[in-house]
């Protein structure tokens, strides 16, 4: 897994590549926490290049959403492939997290 | 029949009334004596009320004593009445003639009273013994007939336990199968079986219970039923045999045992795995006439000892190859001189046999064995099963990936890489490859994190099989017995703040696969999942 982090205005864009699974989730969580601790409050998680997400990846997303909290900031997710979308649907994460279709759509929502 | 309370009846036949008076005088105290003065009269009396014994004069006008005797012996109703000839003649040739006609004895006239009494008494006693024997024989015969009838029913029941309708799978073009069993007695200890496990696999079984007759037949029925039950949901011959052995050994007061060969064959690929528990090794008869003896053995006979772990081996049939299973009734068939049919003869036969079909093969082997035995009594059951691989793998993606890893989270990444490479190689739909990776990540991490008190030193087996229609994933670990699919489904309607972290993996696995199975087999948790490939996923 690789995360490419860039900035678009006050939004930090995290472009994931590979799998967000048992092996890679701890590293993803570390990088995200580093950003939040560094003051980032608007996160756009771009899954365009994500192969699949496992429950450990969902756990990181959930932890991040909790950390940002309703007041502290916003996390949006975009670019779900069919498999990731299915995982979001089954787990209910599609309804509790902010999901957009494309990065443009997502940026417009912040 | 001799009446117990009444006096026995003796019929004296003589054309000289004085002679009859003499006889009467001697016998009247102990017997009821009836008299006749010629043959015709004697026959009439006998017909009306058969006496217990007949004293018969030979030389009589009209019908001679011989003729009377002949007629008595020709009639089933009177032939058992002892006849003693009374004659003045002393020539041995005449005596011989009387005996040839069935006479019991000879007494020469003039009659000596003690001798007459003694002979009559002796022959009546003999007759009574004979009657008792015959009555006893009648009872025995009746019982024997009933046992025979029961054995015949047993034979019918036993044979009905074996699949006997051929072609057994008329819709299957991938293979051709035939089996036959010729018991040495009405019922026996041999058996065979075959049944489909799923769309791709067939289980083939041949077994031989120690001993013969009813005990062997009963043990055979138990063994066959257990195997069939154990094979449901278990695709490992070693695991099936291990479990059935435990069950058979646990309650086996008569110390019977069974030799078994069990194969599970993927009839699309021709790949098979097999377990041999003390059975004679089968053969692969190759399309070109060559033979391979499957001489791997994986343990002793089943039923002998509890707690044994059986192994298994793998093999593959090419198109036109046949798997030939049999019991030792084939190779140990004896001719009239006690020579064995033996393996060499069987191998030579298999090498040159007509390969047009399974039934031709089994039939030809049986014919050869029977021809060899040439009417010598069959000493053991003969069982033959032949499986012909008709078409090898169908077109389309088919492949298998087997991995064994240490129970260590650090190994999961490597598994996922190999699985991805497998998905690419087999050209699985992209989504299916992604799901497969996700599912394995969930299963392996769960197993390693929660399945062991200390995972170090433990291994986990991953088996992936893809064919044109289905992807099958199997993960087997030796961890604490645990069926993940009995977990309660987490509440996915909770919001971000209410949601507990974790607990989702199993649900994702369940929802993203088409079937989920859990079994505890031979000390292993075995999870089997399938994903159908006929949809666009």
Image (cartoon, coloured by chain):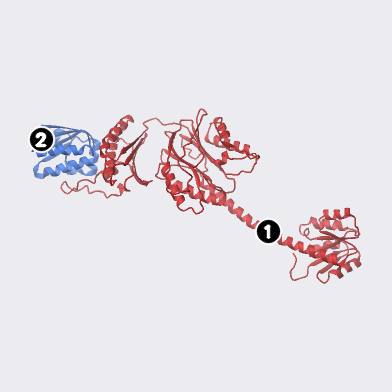
Residue at point 32%, 32% (across, down): B422
Circle 1 residue: B138
Camera-nearest label, 1 or 2: 1
The Cα atoms of the two marked residues, 1 and 2, are separated by 107 Å
Residue at point 22%, 49% (across, down): B491
Name the outermost residue toward the front: B457
Q: Position of residue B508 (x, y in %)?
A: 26, 43
Which class describes the residues within 10 Å of circle 1: few (<14), some (14-19), or many (20+)?
few
The picture's colour for chain B is red
User: In the rendering, which numbered label is found on residue A11?
Assistant: 2
Residue at point 43%, 46% (across, down): B308
Q: Nearer the viewer, residue B205 or B260?
A: B260
Q: Position of residue B468 (x, y in %)?
A: 37, 33
Q: Position of residue A16 (x, y in %)?
A: 19, 33
Helix, strand or loop under label 2: strand
User: Label 2 is found on which chain of the structure?
Assistant: A
User: Label 1 is found on which chain of the structure?
Assistant: B
Which image quarter: residue B346? top right
Which class describes the residues within 10 Å of circle 2: few (<14), some (14-19), or many (20+)?
some
């Amino acid at each position: 897994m690789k995360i490419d982090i860039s900035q678009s205005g006050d939004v930090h864009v995290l472009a994931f590549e590979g799998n967000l699974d048992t092996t890679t989730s701890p590293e993803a969580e570390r990088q995200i926490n580093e950003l939040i601790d560094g003051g980032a409050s608007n996160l756009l998680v771009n899954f365009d290049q994500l192969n699949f997400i496992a429950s450990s990846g969902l756990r990181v997303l959930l932890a991040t959403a909790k950390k940002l909290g309703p007041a502290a900031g916003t996390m949006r997710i975009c670019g779900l492939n069919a498999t990731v979308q299915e995982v979001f649907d089954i787990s209910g994460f599609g309804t509790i997290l902010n999901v957009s279709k494309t990065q443009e759509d997502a940026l417009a929502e912040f | 029949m001799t009446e117990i309370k009444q006096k026995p009846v003796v019929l004296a036949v003589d054309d000289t009334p004085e002679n009859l008076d003499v006889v009467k005088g001697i016998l009247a105290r102990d017997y009821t004596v009836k008299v006749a003065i010629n043959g015709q009269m004697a026959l009439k009396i006998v017909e009306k009320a058969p006496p217990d014994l007949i004293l018969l004069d030979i030389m009589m006008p009209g019908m001679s004593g011989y003729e009377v005797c002949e007629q008595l012996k020709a009639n089933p109703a009177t032939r058992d009445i002892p006849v003693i000839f009374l004659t003045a003649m002393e020539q041995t040739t005449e005596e011989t003639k009387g005996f040839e006609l069935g006479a019991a004895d000879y007494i020469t006239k003039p009659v000596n009273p003690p001798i007459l009494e003694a002979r009559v008494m002796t022959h009546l006693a003999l007759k009574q013994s004979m009657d008792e024997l015959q009555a006893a024989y009648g009872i025995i015969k009746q019982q024997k007939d009933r046992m025979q009838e029961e054995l015949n029913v047993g034979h019918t029941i036993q044979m009905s336990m074996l699949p006997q309708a051929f072609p057994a799978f008329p819709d299957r073009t991938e293979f051709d199968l035939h089996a036959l069993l010729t018991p040495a007695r009405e019922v026996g200890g041999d058996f065979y079986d075959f049944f489909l496990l799923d769309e791709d696999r067939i289980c083939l079984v041949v077994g031989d219970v120690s001993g013969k007759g009813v005990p062997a037949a009963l043990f055979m029925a138990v063994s066959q039923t257990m195997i069939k039950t154990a094979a449901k949901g278990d695709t490992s011959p070693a695991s099936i045999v291990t479990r059935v052995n435990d069950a058979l050994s646990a309650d086996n007061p008569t110390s019977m045992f069974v030799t078994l060969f069990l194969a599970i064959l993927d009839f699309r690929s021709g790949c098979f795995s097999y377990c041999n528990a003390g059975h004679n090794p089968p053969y692969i008869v190759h399309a070109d006439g060559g033979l391979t003896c499957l001489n791997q053995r994986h343990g002793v006979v089943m039923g002998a000892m509890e707690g044994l772990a059986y192994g298994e081996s793998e093999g593959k049939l090419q198109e036109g190859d046949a798997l030939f299973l049999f019991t030792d009734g084939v190779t140990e068939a004896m001719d009239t001189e006690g020579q064995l049919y033996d393996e060499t003869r069987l191998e030579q036969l298999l090498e040159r046999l007509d390969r047009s079909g399974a039934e031709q093969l089994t039939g030809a082997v049986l014919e050869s064995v029977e021809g060899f035995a040439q009417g010598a009594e069959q000493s053991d059951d003969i069982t033959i099963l032949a499986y012909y691989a008709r078409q090898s793998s169908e077109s389309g993606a088919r492949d298998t990936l087997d991995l064994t890893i240490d129970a260590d989270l650090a190994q999961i990444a490597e598994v996922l890489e190999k699985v991805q490479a497998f998905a690419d190689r087999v050209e699985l739909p992209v989504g299916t490859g992604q799901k497969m990776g996700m599912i394995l990540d969930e299963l392996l991490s769960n197993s390693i994190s929660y399945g062991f008190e200390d995972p170090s030193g433990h291994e986990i087996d991953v088996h992936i099989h893809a064919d044109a229609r289905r992807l099958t994933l199997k993960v087997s670990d030796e961890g604490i017995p645990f069926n993940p699919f009995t977990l309660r489904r987490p509440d996915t309607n909770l919001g971000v703040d209410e949601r507990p972290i974790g607990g989702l993996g199993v649900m994702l696995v369940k929802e993203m696969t088409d079937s989920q199975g859990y079994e505890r087999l031979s000390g292993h948790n075995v999870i089997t999942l399938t994903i159908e490939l006929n949809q666009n996923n």
